[in-house]
């Protein structure tokens, strides 16, 4: 049924039906109750697409993530979703699996759904497309990953300082052969964490051996591969700095695969593991703040949608990580 059918059954104008549906304008309690009864009787559902075309608003926000299975990104997303629901917006989720082609398809799909804003942890492979989306009038907020070539709002962590502190912690525990399991250097978080770790080693007077640098891809599989690599060396590292929690998970899986006791290698992880409290030894982890990131993004998003931040679209918000060691 259409809104005209409902108006005919209720004996009122389509404008009255619209006011009841949108809770806008005055409708007497008696008429409102009558209209609601007719809507329930015929199980009328407004056409959301037609409404968005007429109002030029879809009340929807797209969010594109590289790995929806990662608890870090899901905690951020859930916090953003909570804030959006408060303002009557809904999130459409897409997972790129760190694949630039899938990311490009996801961006196109979301634009076809007439999203009002986009939150994106990009692979870095579609920068021109992303800038074009912003230039066309859709609000874009970069999540976690920064790109100097994009003049866009960004909410991220202080990766360099935290990674530098991680190395200082290992040096204080008298480690000199420290392996670095880095993420893909095309991603800003991985580049910044690697840079911070190398600065920490340099300040400690430790020359990093090339065979102790392993570039992973933020997956468990690359953490496993890193351990296989390190334990093929004549002198394996005594400690490892892992640039994200999924690779840390892989590091422990790799140790188990090789039959190496978990406490034989000291690990500092950028991001904790949910089950690390079950270990017989303590995992040293930089505590990320996904809820703080989600809250900052959610607040900035609503301000943008309400036009309350000004014309500049390149706010930079940095959330410090917690260093518990």
Image (spheres, rainbow, N blue to C red):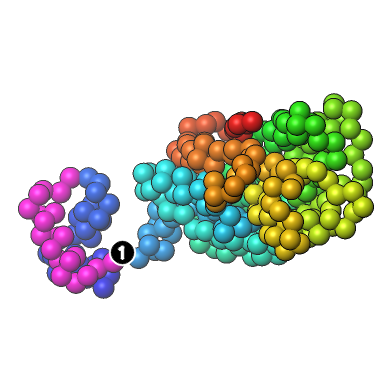
For residue 125, side relative to residue 49 (left or right): right
* Up-down relation of residue 105 to residue 15 (above or below): below
| Residue 234 shown left or right of residue 78 in the figure | right
Residue 77 location, x and y as percent? 50, 49
Whole-percent x and y of residue 58? 44, 55
Q: Nearer the viewer, residue 315 or 180?
A: 180
Residue at 13 percent across and 63 percent down: it is 37
Q: Secondary structure at mark 1?
A: loop
User: Residue 170, how many percent across, how many down?
Assistant: 75, 34
**Label 1: how many Cα within 10 Å (few below 14, some 14–19, many 20+):** some
If the image is split into quadrants, where does the C terminus sit? top right
**Which quarter of the figure has residue 258?**
bottom right
In this rendering, the answer to whether 33 lies above or below 199 is below
Q: Is residue 100 visible?
A: no
Find the residue positioned furthest to the left: 30
**Residue situated in front as seen by the camera: 89 or 5:** 89
Q: Is residue 117 magenta?
A: no
Q: Residue at 59% of width from left, 61% of height from top?
A: 95
Quadrant location of the N terminus in the rendered image: bottom left
Q: Is residue 16 left or right of residue 170?
A: left
The magenta stretch spans residue 27:
yes
What residue do we see at 69% from left, 33% from top?
Answer: 162
Judging depth in this view, the residue of 258 and 10 nearest the camera is 258
The boundaries of the magenta stretch are: 26-45
State the residue position of label 1.
46
């Amino acid at each position: 049924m259409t809104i005209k059918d409902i108006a005919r059954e209720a004996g009122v104008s389509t404008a009255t039906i619209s006011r009841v549906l949108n809770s806008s304008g005055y409708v007497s309690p008696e008429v409102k109750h009558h209209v609601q009864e007719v809507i329930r009787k015929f199980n009328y559902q407004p056409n959301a697409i037609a409404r968005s075309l007429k109002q030029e608003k879809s009340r929807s926000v797209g969010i594109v993530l590289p790995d929806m299975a990662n608890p870090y990104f899901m905690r951020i997303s859930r916090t953003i979703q909570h804030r959006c629901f408060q303002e009557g917006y809904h999130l459409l989720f897409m997972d790129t699996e760190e694949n630039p082609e899938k990311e490009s398809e996801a961006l196109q799909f979301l634009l076809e759904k007439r999203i009002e804003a986009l939150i994106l942890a990009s692979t870095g492979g579609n920068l021109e497309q992303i800038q074009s989306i912003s230039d066309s009038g859709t609000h874009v907020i970069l999540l976690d990953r920064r790109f100097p070539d994009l003049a866009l709002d960004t909410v991220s962590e202080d990766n360099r300082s935290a990674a530098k502190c991680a190395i200082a912690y290992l040096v204080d525990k008298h480690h000199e052969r420290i392996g670095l399991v880095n993420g893909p250097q095309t991603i800003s978080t991985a580049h910044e964490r690697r840079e911070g770790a190398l600065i920490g080693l340099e300040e400690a007077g430790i020359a990093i051996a090339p065979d102790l640098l392993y570039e992973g891809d933020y997956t468990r599989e690359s953490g496993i591969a890193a351990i296989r690599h390190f334990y093929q060396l004549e002198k394996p590292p005594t400690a490892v700095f892992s640039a994200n929690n999924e690779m840390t998970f892989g590091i422990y899986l790799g140790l188990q695969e090789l039959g190496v006791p978990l406490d034989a290698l000291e690990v500092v992880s950028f991001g904790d593991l949910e089950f690390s409290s079950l270990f017989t030894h303590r995992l040293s982890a930089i505590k990320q703040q996904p809820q703080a990131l989600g809250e900052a993004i959610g607040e900035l998003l609503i301000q943008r949608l309400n036009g309350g931040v000004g014309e500049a679209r390149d706010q930079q918000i940095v959330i410090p990580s917690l260093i518990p060691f």
